[in-house]
Image: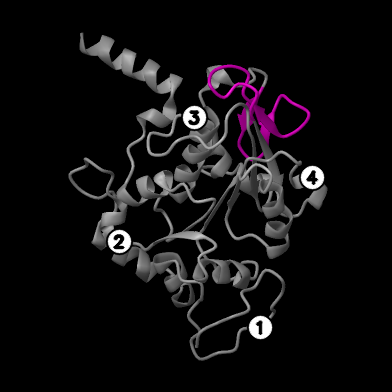
Amino acid sequence: MILAGLEAAAELDALDPCAAMTWTAWQRSLLADASSFRLALTANQLGKTVSAAADVVMEVRGSNPYRPRRHAGPITVVMLGESISQMSAADGPLEKLWKLLPKHEIDPKIVFERGTGIRGVKEPVIRFVRGPGAGSVIQLRTYNQPARSKAGSTVHMVWADEPMPEKTYGELAPRLLRNQGLFLYTLTPVPDMYDQTWAREKAETGVFSVHHVTMKPEHTQPEGFARPLISQAMIDQFREQLPEVERAMRLEASWDPVVTGRWLTNFDERTVQSFSV
């Protein structure tokens, strides 16, 4: 009887992996946010990427229990990252997305391969061929591709994972206008990221609905769990392991690194231009 129950649960999980997930309070808040432009600005290891992957899958399928689907019929989602290799790295955004896809609903020719990405099709796309999202596609793009390759004229949702250049945002945001689409930006600041002055300004002026999540035990505790997944002792140990210049960014999701009595050199387009001393 117990084995039969476990097998039934496993089968249900395979049919709808997102439904099997348990979220923390901040993740549920992100998933429930119906704002057109959202920013998940979080510390490391808090589950921002898996939350965003679930957000995409549930928007395609109309299965988000926390907010209604915005569009009727098939939709086009653009998923972006620094590079295909970064996106498809172990435990990267594409692997997390792949784990949450109901495989019986997508093109059976498609497979995911770590470090390579999506295989089995000419273009890097994930097509839904059956189920509630039938006809929808998730297009995979990178920040360095030409503007014309990043999106078409009927985009309904964009998910950009990790720090993005302003020019890419400028190319994508207008593509959402016709469909009143959704823009989701997930990142943990790092010292050598693209200049994020533009994103910071949009967060401060309210263009982005901001989910700013710092490294605290309560932010790692799924609802219904007796204790957090990361304890304060683990956080303290992690803090000591980090270079001092990165602590505010990786633990507090601060836009700025800590500058400690020395000049920073070798600036380029990928370097934050505004520092607090």
Mark 4: amino acid: Ser
Mark 1: amino acid: Thr
Q: Could you tell which of marks 1 and 3 lies nearer the N-terminus?
A: 3
Which mark is drawn over residue 62? 3
> Looking at the picture, how far across and down is residue 251, in whole percent?
40, 66
The answer to whether 136 appears left or right of 231 in the picture is right
Where 177 sits versus 216, above or below?
above
The answer to whether 157 appears left or right of 174 in the picture is left
Give the CA distance from mark 3 to mark 2: 32 Å
Q: Could you tell which of marks 4 and 3 lies nearer the N-terminus?
A: 3
**Overall secondary structure of the magenta stretch?**
loop
* Residue lying furthest bottom: 261
Q: Secondary structure at mark 1?
A: loop
Q: Could you tell which of marks 4 and 1 lies nearer the N-terminus?
A: 4
Give the CA distance from mark 4 to mark 1: 34 Å
Q: Nearer the viewer, residue 32 or 6?
A: 32
Which quadrant is the N terminus positioned in? top left
Q: Nearer the viewer, mark 3 or mark 2?
A: 3
Mark 2 residue crowding within 10 angstroms, few (<14) / some (14–19) / many (20+): some
Give the CA distance from mark 4 to mark 3: 27 Å
Q: Could you tell which of marks 1 and 2 lies nearer the N-terminus?
A: 2
Q: Which residue is mark 1?
A: 265
Q: Which residues are magenta?
A: 110-136
> Looking at the picture, how far across and down is residue 235, in whole percent?
31, 62
Give the CA distance from mark 1 to mark 2: 32 Å
* Residue at screen point 71% across, 57% down: 168
Where 39 sits versus 134, above or below?
below
Q: Which residue is mark 2?
A: 216
The verdict on residue 172 being magenta is no
Q: Secondary structure at mark 3?
A: loop
